[in-house]
Amino acid sequence: MPAFFVLLILIGVAAFLMIGLYNALVRIRQQVKSAWSQIDVQLKRRYDLIPNLVETVKGYAAHEKETFERVVQARNTALAATGVAQQAQAENALTGALRQLFALAEAYPELKANQNFLALQEELTSTENKISFARQHYNDVVADYNTRRLSFPANLFAAGLGFGPEEFFEIETPGERTAPQVKF
Amino acid sequence: MARTFLDLIAANRRNSVLLIAAFVLLVVATVYAFALVLGGGDPRRSLQAGAVALVVAILLTIWGAYGGASAILAMSRAREIRKEEDPQLWNVVEELSIAAGLPMPKLYLIDDEALNAFATGRDPAHAAVAITKGLREKLTRDELQGVLAHELSHVRNLDIRFAMLLAVLVGLLVLLCDLFRRWLWWGRPGRRRTSAPGGGAAILIIMVLAIVLSIIAPLLARLIQLAASRQREYLADASAVELTRYPLGLANALAKIAGDQEVLEVANRATQHLYIVNPIHPFEERAKGLFSTHPPIEERIRRLRALAGADSPMAAT
């Protein structure tokens, strides 16, 4: 009789542990999904800030048309991009164009002193950082999820219950690894 | 052979657990020894006394864990700020919240020229971070982010709760030792000492040990508490790097803080351990050993720079 109860308790403990592991996997996978959409949120933020920036700079450096057009075009391309690879490429082009726009400010001291411009510069810098951090966070959560998935004893049942591997956010196009050129 | 910040974080967490375990052991041993003596050597009564003490400890800990952040903020003359008042500061904290995947804490500014910052709040959903005006103005964006990442990490690692837990345990231990000595001195009201099975000699030895313990235990407890506090500071530094992936930001900020001689007026003994650098000790003594709440700044900077040398493509500065 006692052996039966011991067995029952052991099964109970094992079930309890399994439930705990399962719930943890569910929770972390949701974090992965949430982190992925956070990246999109920050990207959209950048798109929304750009028109305002271009207008402000135009007021002081009207004849630098080429730089403005590059920025606006890069933005529109990024907005229209489909697929991760295309979007990554478009994002890279946009970052480069923005960098040139800010480099412009060096040549126009009135622009540099303009409060609106400075505020926008801070917002855009911050947005670039946020995109970076969102990607970093996404990768952190993916690493956590994959580790839990592959660890014992969760790896015994994880695949069977539909917990597939998640992919890291990686640079897809070779060109993105080199820093964008800033031409004066 | 360089360790990454992940190794540092794991090591620190392990050390914290060991310290708490040592502490709990100390408390249990003390309570048992006292209960043994006060209960007249009867194991059952000792167990009862021990159980009562344990329940009290748990209740106090729970109460301590929900302690209000607002009292501390009021003590420090901190003013909550909105995004419009300082967009850059706000953005820096918001970026860190995204990196950590946590809700944004409330932001406070302390009107003082000294260079310091602190974090408070029982968990990330109820957190607040405060920074002095002096520090806000003296740091670059990267350094600011390093400091705030350190503070946010205190919240992330539940250090505030950890510190309260320890404070409650230390307080309880001190109280117990006090009560014990008092009871021994004045005699327990209305109780006759029952003789233990095994004779009076055993009881006498235990009593001597208990008396010695009652004097040493509070000191030991305080040392453990301070050691734990130092460990959590190192952990917060490593966790800050985990967020920013830029150790030099925090390292440079600490270097700037270390060089500053101004005294933070609103800090006091109750809040000193919350700050990024201990605000109330004289500057020469700030870094000294076992009785310090914070590790030496030079050592913190050294560890951060070592991370930068190992992890980043930039050469060590």
Image (cartoon, coloured by chain):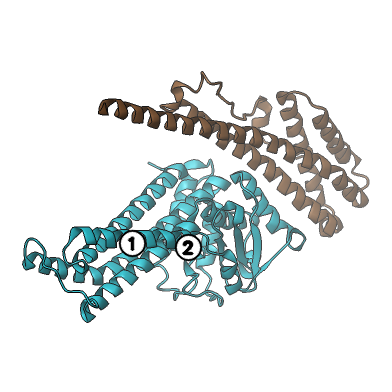
From this viewpoint, is residue B290 visible? Answer: no
Q: Is residue A38 left or right of residue B202?
A: right
Residue A150 is situated, as x and y percent measured from the top left of the image, at 46, 26
Residue A32 is situated, as x and y percent measured from the top left of the image, at 61, 33
| Disc 2 from disc 1: Cα separation | 18 Å
Residue B193 is situated, as x and y percent measured from the top left of the image, at 15, 72
The amino acid type of the residue labelled 1 equals Val
Residue drawn at x 87%, y 43% as measured from the top left? A51
Depth check: B270 or B126 in front? B126
What color was chain B assigned in the picture?
Answer: cyan
Q: Given the image, what chain letter belongs to the residue carrying mark 2? A: B
Residue wearing tag 2: B64
Q: Is residue B262 left or right of residue B35?
A: right
Q: Is residue B88 left or right of residue A80?
A: left
Q: Given the image, what chain letter belongs to the residue carrying mark 1? A: B
Mark found first going from the N terminus, 2 or 1: 1
Q: Which chain is brown?
A: A
Q: Is residue B129 left or right of residue A51?
A: left
Mark linked to residue B61? none
SS for dot 1: helix
Residue drawn at x 50%, y 75% as measured from the top left? B268
The amino acid type of the residue labelled 2 equals Gly
Residue drawn at x 66%, y 48% as measured from the top left? B95
Q: Nearer the viewer, mark 2 or mark 1?
A: 1
Q: Crowdedness of circle 1 by 10 Å Cα count: few (<14), some, many (20+)?
A: few
Q: Crowdedness of circle 2 by 10 Å Cα count: few (<14), some, many (20+)?
A: many
Residue wearing tag 1: B52
From this viewpoint, is residue A38 visible? Answer: yes
Residue A12 is situated, as x and y percent measured from the top left of the image, at 39, 30
Q: Are marks 2 and 1 on the same chain?
A: yes
Q: Is residue B273 above or below residue B12?
A: below
Q: Is residue B296 above or below residue B103?
A: below
